Image (spheres, grey):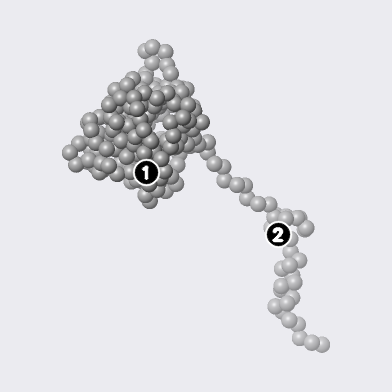
Amino acid sequence: MPPIDRRRLLGAAALALPAVGCAPGQTPARPPAPVTPPRTVWTFDNLEAIGGLRPRIEGAPVLIDSPFGKAVKFDGVDDALFIDRHPLAGATTFTFEALFRPDGGAFEQRWLHLQSDEPDGGPGTRILFEIRVVAGGWYLDAFAKGAGYNTPLIDETKLHPLGVWTHVAQSFDGTTYRSYVNGVLQAEVPLAFTPQPDGRSSVGVRINRVNYFNGAVREARFTRAYTPPEMFANPFR
């Protein structure tokens, strides 16, 4: 009688076993695909349609070239875009990113403002990005305000150079509100956030036409979920 080839015997036995969790002859089930949270992207590469919406133009913003494609340049005097949408309205957690270039000018500049529509006497519900221009550069001011909260994120010691394309972000994960520049944390605080009603947005100025922005904006991203910084659409990481 020839000797038994144990390796061949074990291999045959393994082939005869069904896949774990499957009946014989069935294909193993694939894991579910990851769910992509709802996201809106506004690309400022034209002045006719931003994120599928037609902006109202004031002043004379112009298109310029950037390392990432066309962008909209604002003069810091009277240039602005107004868009009839608050892209984070109703979100319980969120991530708000933007790619922009500040070029100097006035100390206080509000350049991306999401405003809820409210009756007179409302809390002035909004989420926004501002900068403060000082000797040596600028620092970020991210801000969220609504019923029961009024929260700026500012660190005056974290300065960044003017005239340089920069990625900024702010996020809320359900408990903590954070801001970032090029993926680096700037400030964080606990926040009792509540979802914001529908509304509108301004780019290049505060919604009431003060604090005009001198610089350019290429893109804004609005994700209705928390995104960790390593997952930002940050071209500088």
Relative side of 15 to 39, left or right = right
State which quarter of the image contains the N terminus: bottom right
Residue at label 2?
A: 19
Relative side of 46 to 100, left or right = right
Q: Residue at x 75, y 82 (%)?
A: 4
Quadrant of the image occupied by residue 148: top left
Q: Choose between 236 and 218: the one closer to the eye.
A: 218
Residue 14's x, y, as percent?
Answer: 71, 68
Residue at label 1?
A: 66
Secondary structure beneath label 1? strand
Residue 42's x, y, as percent?
Answer: 45, 35
In this view of the protein, can residue 116 be seen by the observer? yes
Residue 180's x, y, as percent?
Answer: 34, 41
Q: Residue at x 30, y 35 (%)?
A: 215
Q: Choose between 171 and 192: the one closer to the eye.
A: 171
Going by the numbered disc 2, the residue's amino acid type is Ala
In this view of the protein, can residue 224 be seen by the observer? no
Residue 61, relative to residue 26: is it above or below?
A: above
Query: Which residue is at the far bottom?
Result: 1
Going by the numbered disc 1, the residue's amino acid type is Ser
Q: Are marks 1 and 2 in contact (CB under 8 Å)?
A: no
Q: Earlier in the sequence, mark 1 or mark 2?
A: 2
Query: Which residue is at the far right?
Result: 1
